[in-house]
Every structure is written in structure tokens, then in C-alpha cells.
Image (tube, rainbow, N blue to C red):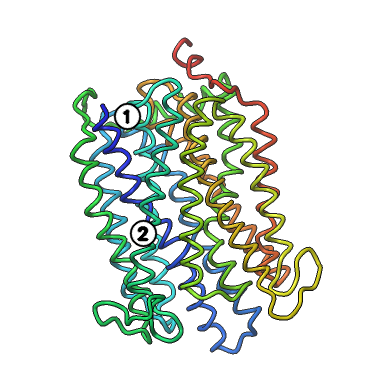
Amino acid sequence: MRKKIWGWYFYDWACQPYNTLMLTFIFGPFFAATAVEYYASLGLSEDAADARAQTLWSNALTIVGLIIGFSAPILGAIADSAGRRMPWLMGFTAMLIAGGFATWFSDPNGGNLIFMLMAFCFGFMGSELAYIFANAQLPEIAQGDDVGSVSGSGFAFGYLGGVISLLIVLPLFVAQGDGKTILGIDPLFGFDPSMKEGTRFTGPFVALWCLVFAIPYFAWMNETDRPKSRPSFAVAMSRLKSSIAGLKHRHSQAFFLAASMFYRDAMNGLYTFGGIYATLVLDWDIVKIGVFGIVAAIGAMVFSYLGGKMDRRLGPKPVLMVTIVLLIAVCIVIVSMTKDSIFGVTLPDGSTLPDTIFFVCGVLIGGFGGMLQSTSRTLMVRHTAKGRETLEFGLYGLSGRATAFLAPALIGIATTITGSARLGVSPLIGLFIIGFILLLWVQPKGDAETWENG
């Protein structure tokens, strides 16, 4: 069983760099900067170009989030009906790898912005769907109070992979304004800084990383103990329908899934727009954002591990609720800060205080975000009926994605209305608050027995 657990950990290690490097700290900000320069070349003002770039990114993630959310429970039900998850995981992993390789062909002059988005989103879709199926395996490898510890350690190990991948990419490949990496050397492999080749190599690097480090998972995480049958769409839809109908008798699960719609959407918004915020509001370059990413990922690694231990001792619900409150406070600080002021107080010219505060916020976002994801996964296990794990984690995926359009859409609307990328992220505060309120009706030990006994 220990080998199986480590295989499961390695899948997090293999896939996490797609989120760390591609979504948040390298490709996302690179896309934003490329889009801003492109729109500015068309005659838009700086603020208008910033807003247009953020809105384009928001709309793409809205569409992808809806596709992921509504397909997850259906695919999960099909996998449960057949008793097989690994073929699906192989397919989704292949999507991640293909999407990563495709982003190499991004035009740094903005000539193919839509292709850049489509390539990224294809890999992102594979990554997110794979996580849903891998999460459904947690009840197989840990039971009782150990679930929280295993879940937290899994996230911590994944974030460690994200940190190491950043520590490789930043000093060796990503060029600064002077064409050198932060080590003062030319990007490896003769990559051309003027064409952002070192930055664009992030996608193929993430793909190769996943290809190599997913091997222990597929070698050790077998499904020999699960009964197999032919996949049946009819059986899957019947199971899905009964699970959704059963929510009227499982009030705790219904409130938990509703709560997670909002607080996980807000968390995804923070992850998605953190690097873009730094680019558009604080004028950080890719290298500085990458260093910020290392700090945030280290925070996530440490907090996830400690959160798993707290989860085991106190249970997931209290840890989750405290985490949400602290994230609300972080959001308030971010929205109230500009390059020149904090909470309306003007700073001296050249002050580095906003940069310092945002670095601290990055640690807290990464740390508390890791705790939020880990404890949420544990709480979902407590609401998961045996034999329906993938289906119910599909519903969990749906709850995290059915409203996935909300954060990007609200950010897009708020950005358009205010003309400010900074104020555009303010709706995340409201989403966190709604999620916190709904959690009040969730049973700390879950209600899986309601299904199993009913």
C-alpha cells in the first residue's frame, strides 16, 4: 500500500507544474504581456489594453471551466460503471502533454493569440480532468483520519515538484529584459530572447516533466482489485441521475458541494489572475513573477503538509473555514493596493512596499490555497459513498467548475466596468464569503452513510 500511495503522490508531482508554470507564473503572465503589447499596437491606451487582455484570458477560462465541470460527473459515472479509471487518466495525461508541447508555437508578437489560448486550454483541460479521476482514488489508499494526512502530503509533494520545476526553468531558460537569465547567462539550447523562446519552452518542459514523472504512478497505482465491466453510458447516466436526486436526502453533501462552487471558484480566480495582476498592476516582468511563484509554491508546500496534520487532528471543516477567512483578508489587501498607495495612503516615490506586501500575499495565497484544496478533498472523501467514488468526485469537480465561469466572468465584468485590472479581482471576496456561509450547514464527518444505509 505504501508503494501505491507514493505512486499517487507522484501524479501530483508530475502534473502540478502545469498549474504552477503554465497557469499562474510563466505562461499566463507571458500571454497577458503579449496580449497587452498587441492591443497597444492597435492604438488602445495602457489601461484599455490591460483590460482587454485580462478579459480575453477570463473568457477563455470561463468556457474551459464549463466544459470541464459538466463533463466531469458524466465521465466519472462511465468510469465507475466500468470499474476502470486508468485508461481515462492516460488519455487526460496525453492531453496535458500535447497542450504543453503546442504552446511552443506561440507568437511573442501576438499574431496567434487565439491559438495560444487554445493550446494552453487543451492541456489545462486534460490536467483538471485527470486530477478529478486521481482524487477519486484517495479513498482506496487511505482510510479514516489518515485521509487528511495523505491528502495534505500529496499536495505538499506536488507543490515541491512545482518549486523544483520553477527553479530549473527560471535560471536556465527564461530571459530578462537584458536577454540573460537571472544567473546572468544566455538561455540554454541557444534560445533566442528576442523571440521569447526560453519562456515558450516552458510548455514543452512541463510536457516532458509530466511524461517522465507520471511513470511511477502508472506503474504502481494499479486497478487489479476493482471489478471490471464494459463501459455503459446508460448505466452511467442512471447512476448520475440517482446521485443528483439523492442530494435532497443528503443535505450535508448538497451544502458542501454548493459551498465549494463558490470558495473553490474564488481560489481558482486567485491562482489564475495572481500572476496577471502582478503583470498588469505592479508591472512585474516574467522573471520577477517566477521568483514570486517559487516563494508562493514553497508556502503552499509547507502549509499543505502542516494543514494535513491539522486536518488529521481537528478534522477538515474547521481548518477549511479558518483558511477561507484568512484568504478573504488577503484579497482585501490586494484590492486595496496599487504601485503608489495602500488603502488609499500615498507612498513615497519608488517605494517597494507594494512589491513586498504582494510577495507576502503570494506566500499566503499559495499556503492557504494548498490547505483549502487539501482539506476540501478530505471533506469530500467523508461525503463519498463506496463504489461511486469517481462519479461523486465528478460531482465535486462539477461543483468546482459549474460556476467556474463566475470568477473569470465577474472579474471580466468588473474590469470592464471599472477599467481597472486591480479592482477587477474584487468579486473574489464575495465568492469566498458565500462559500463560508454555506459551509456552516456541512457535517464535519460527512454523510456518506446516508447513501450507504439508505
Residue in the picture at 51% in, 73% down: 32
User: Dot 1 lies on which element?
Assistant: helix
Residue in the picture at 58% in, 68% down: 278
Q: Is residue 414 above or below residue 136?
A: below
Estimate the x, y position of residue 445 in percent, counting from the top left: 54, 20
Estimate the x, y position of residue 4 in percent, counting from the top left: 26, 32
Residue furthest front as drawn: 183
Residue 325 falls left or right of residue 43: right
Nearest the eye: 262 or 303: 303
Q: Amino acid at mark 1?
A: Asp
In the picture, the quarter occupied by the N terminus is: top left
Q: Report the residue marked by disc 2.
A: 122
Q: Is residue 102 above or below residue 12?
A: below
Estimate the x, y position of residue 59 in percent, counting from the top left: 54, 63
Residue furthest top as drawn: 453
Q: CA distance from mark 1 to mark 2?
A: 24 Å
Q: Is residue 122 above or below residue 436?
A: below
Estimate the x, y position of residue 268 in percent, counting from the top left: 53, 51
Label placed on residue 80:
1
